[in-house]
Image (spheres, helix red, strand yellow):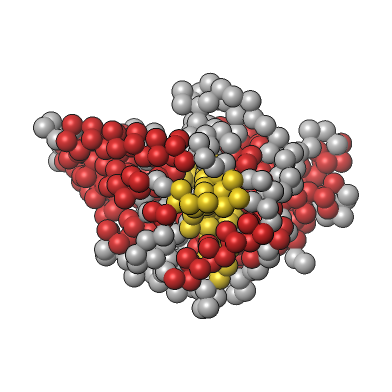
Amino acid sequence: MKPYSLTIHEAHRLLKDGELSPEELTRSVLERIDEVEERIKAFVTIDREGALKAAREAGERLKRDEGVTPLTGIPISIKDIFCTKGMETTCSSRILRGFVPPYDATVVKRLKEAGAVIVGKNNMDEFAMGSSTENSAFQITRNPWDLERVPGGSSGGSAAAVAIGESLASIGTDTGGSIRQPAALCGVVGLKPTYGRVSRYGMIAFASSLDQAGPITRDVEDAAILLGIIAGHDPLDSTSIDEPVPDYLEGIGRGVKGLKIGIPKEYFIEGMDKEVEEAVREAAKTLEKEGAVVEEVSLPHTEYAVATYYLVATAEASSNLARYDGVKYGYRVEDPENLLDMYCRTRDKGFGAEVKRRIMLGTYALSAGYYEAYYGKACQVRTLIKRDFEEAFGKVDIILTPTSPTPAFKVGEKIDDPLKMYLSDVFTIPCNLAGLPGLALPCGFTRGGLPIGMQFIGRALDEATILRAAYHYQSVTGWHLLKPSL
């Protein structure tokens, strides 16, 4: 087995035993990037020099056996939405090209403190707005299972990199499914923690009440390892939850016997791919055979989730993206006639079509005379969606759903039809509106060889239970072991 194809926990054992050095592991990943990146296009920045320097430092740390964590010497990538000190951060947008932050996001800081080796920044949909990574200003990332198809989005670069061996894991962000949907489409594991469980400080905002950082990994154990390192209260983030972080590895091997799993009837809808439905229902039967209690539940306001999300998220995006005006940092048009001309032309040329579409939608929803009818009403429906989950969790421990209604679709297939694209997130959006943790993992393949993902949703701050269920499912199936070949 090539070092780049290891999981975090496999690599950690080899590093601890001295059978592999961090530098050897990092070189293996960098060579893999050289081998496949031209076809995948998962990165916007590759930091070879910084990665090798960090690997050598991790090697010294391992020799001294000081402050060693499961991440020490592990090469990982970061979605290009996190501020990285001394390394360009663009959000895959022209308007931020050339922006080099003077500080690290809290998530990045915690990874570095744990001894992780950051190999680069992953491509994404511009400002995390999209479900296919076709909205990047720089390039389209390809799905490693079929180069004619999308990897999902907006963390498509992260999911593709992990699936094909360009990093052992990645940190993405999830506003309406942007970790879980690409994880499902690329056949890897993606975990969106409870809102507030992971600090948003230094994570460039799309929709502040929905955004959350989380891991994309090759298996569930790795997701538990990464979450344990990046989670925890941060006084620099006012929305960060001041609750102790449990040891997520401690209970993952407890099995699913007696665990009550709810299947929401509203998540099996007309137009959903038949192979996806079959795979998820088969996964439910597997869990039942393993001792779980599976029963139907209802989340009646699910049908309003997409409409609610595209009012709340766009309104917050309109506010958050107002700061990109060409004055303080990032792109600025040359030779503006006056200040207003600079603002208008900078934003027109700096933002892509999807970002401009969402800014306009959000500005309209917040405008005088429409605020209560649109944004205000959406906030009320959001509360109803949250209550649906609370009622369901009075009966069950976790909820099992499909992650995406279809497997990976072809590049260009939906880019000109925003409504069709928005429906790609129909099963992931409710989880964000309710602020709950959700985990996507592979549960099968289509007859055409494309990955199918399912999703576990848990109670607030109960990542441990969905990790436990997912870990057991992986231990009795082998879907996560299958790898794409280029």
| Residue 366 vs residue 3, the one in the foreground | 366
Left or right relative to 279: residue 308: left
Residue 24: give x, y in percent of width and height.
77, 56
The residue lying furthest to the bottom in this view is 448
Residue 285 to residue 47: above or below:
below
Residue 439 to residue 108: above or below:
below
Quadrant assignment, res 165: bottom right
Residue 249 to residue 483: above or below:
above
Q: What residue is drawn where x is 68% and y is 39%?
A: 248
The residue lying furthest to the left in this view is 369
Q: In which quarter of the image is the N terminus?
A: bottom right
Residue 46 visible (yes or no): no
| Residue 330 vs residue 462, the one in the foreground | 462
Q: What residue is drawn where x is 86% and y is 36%?
A: 64
Q: What residue is drawn where x is 60% and y is 50%?
A: 293
Residue 370: give x, y in percent of width and height.
14, 35
Residue 226: give x, y in percent of width and height.
65, 43
Residue 465 visible (yes or no): yes
Residue 350: give x, y in percent of width and height.
29, 48
| Residue 294 vs residue 267, the one in the foreground | 294
Q: What residue is drawn where x is 64% and y is 51%?
A: 292
Q: Quadrant of the C terminus?
A: bottom right
| Residue 189 vs residue 255, the one in the foreground | 255
